[in-house]
Image: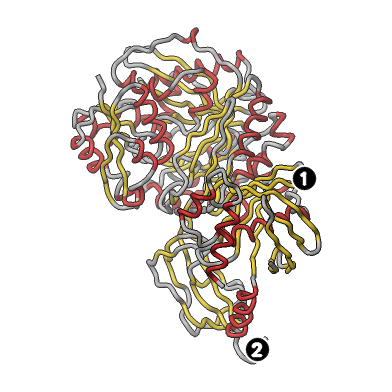
Amino acid sequence: MQYKAIINGETVDVAFERTATGIKAAVGGREYSLDVSLVKPGVFLLNWDTRSIEISVLPEGDTSSVFTVSIEGQRISVEILDGRRMLQRTVRNSDRGGASEIRSPMPGKIVRVLLTSGAEVAAGQGIVVMEAMKMQNEMKSSMSGRIRKIEVVEGETVRSGDLIAIVEAIPGSE
Amino acid sequence: MIKKILIANRGEIAVRIIRACVEMRIGTVAVYSDADRAALHVRMADEAIHIGPAPSRESYLVIENIIRAAKQAEADAIHPGYGFLSENAAFAQACADAGITFIGPSPKAIALMGSKIESRRAVSRFGVPMVPGTVDPVERDEEARTVASSVGYPIMLKASAGGGGKGMRLVRSDAELTEALRNTRAEASAAFGDSAVYIEKFVVEPRHIEIQVLADTHGNAVHLGERECTIQRRHQKVIEECPSPVMDSDLRGRMGKAALDVVRAAEYSNAGTVEFLVDRNRHFYFLEMNTRLQVEHAVTEMVTGIDLVKEQIRVADGEKLGFSQDEVAMNGSAIECRIYAEDPGNNFFPSPGMIQLLQTPSGPGIRDDSGVYEGWTVPIDYDPLISKLVAWGPTRRDAMDRMQRALREYRVKGIQTNLNFFMELLNDSDFRSGQFDTGFIDKWMKNRIAPSPPSQVERDLAVLGAILAEMEKGKSPAELAETDTNETPSLWKTTGRRQSLRH
């Protein structure tokens, strides 16, 4: 099977094939032959040559194909695209057209909404104030533009990954 | 005889206390807020009583609710743990009024030691050395200026009602004093409802070393040696050790004697901790007494072999201490890391959420005092401490090596933790040599070398792991259970089946 993976912002092609005890694969042309055991959901034991490497792989959110992989004390984020998803991604990007989504990085409570829909916002400007574990933090816009929509209200509890706001570029401006 | 104890706390310390009770065949009653319905301490206790909504000021801090729960369960004693109501004299008094044994010192001793000013006054009568400064609050700015210049800059301004590193400010010169006074008073007023502040000389390159004491209600008291608590971040302890790498038996004897003088000054009973600053010339100064069990009590237990929680219960039950000072022996070295749900890569921002995967370390010399389990959601409402990892070894070096080994075994996924931060810290040569002061973490954070990025092979294997997980996704629990059997190839069978369904 052919996949594309995005790792550290870089896209690599992967040829992936099952064997009786594991996998044979080529990642960006580099060939690997591994034995694989499922230790428990989310934990794989890889035997590569004589090395025994345990990795954990957990999805970032319920439906996404972005995974946090922990390997030898390192934490790496990897997105997997199969043919269908590569297509979806192109469509979604063109629809979004220069907009950026601000999503909650962790569960918490919105204590203050600083801007309203339609307001202009500068890159780095706070949009809402969120409280998690007794600390307050501003969720900031990554780009300058206009607030298309604020998806939360004051006092609302949000989960990790929930949409907070959408910022769109102002047409005609850089 | 105490037969049933209500634990007025949550998290790892509630679990720790339940364990002692079970060993002593004492019944246990947990209390819980809305956020803690399925918390580990609730799962482990014999009985559990709901005491209110998630915010602690509406649940764990409400004295009436706790007392009502104790009466409902017919508990004859309450253990307060640390934090929450543990150093609240009114709570200890409310227990006494309700005919329930409070496992801790008297309300009078709590109140005395809870006041920075009253405690300094009481302790000074016994000749316990103190950092030069005022015992009374400074009222006017001119008075503060006079005191500050007589003890000499730099000085610390401290809120009389403060604690836990909050409400204090370093002042380096006369020019900074007026503004610092204004800000500290305002902060103290907002945080503690009391704007009184006092002045202390700032001890340069200090170490923070505390002495564990244990006293019964018959006038017997012992100290159980020291804990090294110098490694702090934002005035919060991060790593603790027993013994301290700078301690010798002469200094321990003198600090132990001073700590027992504090016990006498407060007419103290039960377990307590006397905190000292130690300067580079090994002079020590009394800071404060914590009138409760400490978070870091486990390192003392590992080295002395004494179970502090059981001793607390026995003393509260009116028993005499079962051993004398001469019988307290320190064996080997222990170190503790506080495992927090926080992200060191993002300025230690808290990281609550669901623990999707938990593998805890074990093996020689390892103790993991945890308050969580796999599948538990760390709530946003409380302190993000999830576990205290303790390693013991015959020497300090053995203890550090074991800690590093245990940190490698420890896996927590789904939330961020400071496990890697400790891995790096325990590699630091200054930490390993024991040469540090309270400014260590700040300096270390500035100078630390960023960990090397993942290698090509690690990145490639991570990609393959993600594809494996992608293939596993959407499988039913039954299918996953199937892969748990010895038939390794079934993993591939089920994946194949799912793919054939999809197409």
Can residue B160 be seen? yes
Q: Nearer the viewer, residue B166 or B45?
A: B45
Q: Residue at x 47, y 73 (%)?
A: A114
Q: The residue tagged with tag 1: helix, strand or loop?
A: loop
The label on residue B303 is none
- Percent of width and height locating residue B421: 64, 44
Q: Residue at x 43, y 54 (%)?
A: B380
Mark 2 or mark 1, earlier in chain: 1
Q: Chain of mark 2?
A: A
Q: Residue at x 35, y 16 (%)?
A: B216
Residue at the spot of label 2: A173
Other-residue count near label 2 (Cα within 10 Å), few / some / many at <14 / 14–19 / ≥20? few
Q: The residue tagged with tag 2: helix, strand or loop?
A: loop
Q: Amino acid at mark 1?
A: Asp
Residue at the spot of label 1: A49
Q: Nearer the viewer, residue B309 or A130?
A: B309
- Percent of width and height locating residue B172: 62, 44
